[in-house]
Amino acid sequence: MELLEQRIIRDATVIGDDILKVDMFLNHQIDVDLLNDMGKEFYRLFGDMGITKILTIEASGIGIACIAAQYFSVPVVFAKKGNHKNVGSNVYTSEVFSFTKGVSYTITVSQDYINPEDNILVIDDFLANGKAIMGLKDIIDQAGASLAGVGIAIEKGFQPGGKMIRDNGIKVESLAIVDSMKDGKVKFRR
Ligand code: 5GP
């Protein structure tokens, strides 16, 4: 998606070898107009798949998922990080290793909000090693629901997550795929 790529070039910064910081428009300050265009694009890519729900993970996925959901007219469910007693005892949980924090954490979704009839679009801000997406897939599998596809804002194509998830036969659409970030210079996959 040209607009997102331009924005990354203009406003993103590269941290170390493999972290892209997009606090200027996605992860701290949020450009709602850009998210709106991203939501339209997700709808163009997945709109004919009979999606009943969008599943994401707190916190950064929520804004992207909610704006996209307006086009799909479906609810958003977000996995909470940690063991939440107030979610209740009937929960699905999975373990996710965090690429940015270097630790594992539990994600929790109430069994009330995903059921076997659901055909789910998973949305997240970044795809790196694919652990967050596989954790969400695990929860969808536990619920007996269907995973229709995965919509990602920014995939880092030099990390293995995208290939691993596609090799599992899952449709993955990333609005921007970064192929390299050498010396702070971002190059996209064409
Ligand atoms: P994965 O689970 O695919 O290894 O990593 C994806 C998750 O880690 C995303 O939910 C995102 O929050 C975070 N993440 C991974 N790489 C980056 C990055 O380069 N920049 C930012 N801001 N977050 C990232």
Image (spheres, rainbow, N blue to C red):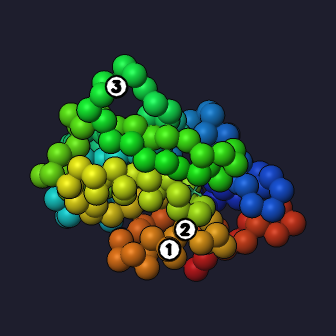
Camera-nearest label, 3 or 1: 3
Amino acid type, residue under disc 2 in the picture: Gly
Which residue matches tag 2? 161
Nearer the N terminus, badge 3 or badge 2? 3
Marker disc for residue 87? 3
Q: Are marks 3 and 2 in contact (CB under 8 Å)?
A: no
Q: Is the CB of the residue bearing disc 2 within 8 angstroms of ligand 1?
A: yes
Is 96 on the left or on the right of 150, as rendered?
A: right
Secondary element at tag 2: helix
Q: Are marks 2 and 1 in contact (CB under 8 Å)?
A: yes
Callout 3 environment at 10 Å: few (<14), some (14 to 19), or many (20+)?
A: some
Amino acid type, residue under disc 1 in the picture: Met
Residue 146's spot in the image, x, y percent?
22, 60
Q: Is the CB of the residue bearing disc 1 within 8 angstroms of ligand 1?
A: no
Marker disc for residue 133? none
Quick check: 53 above or below 162? above
Visible residue check, residue 89: yes
Count of picture labels: 3
Q: Residue at x 27, y 63 (%)?
A: 148
- Which quadrant does the C terminus fall into? bottom right
**C-alpha separation, residue under disc 3 versus residue under disc 2:** 29 Å
Which residue matches tag 1? 164
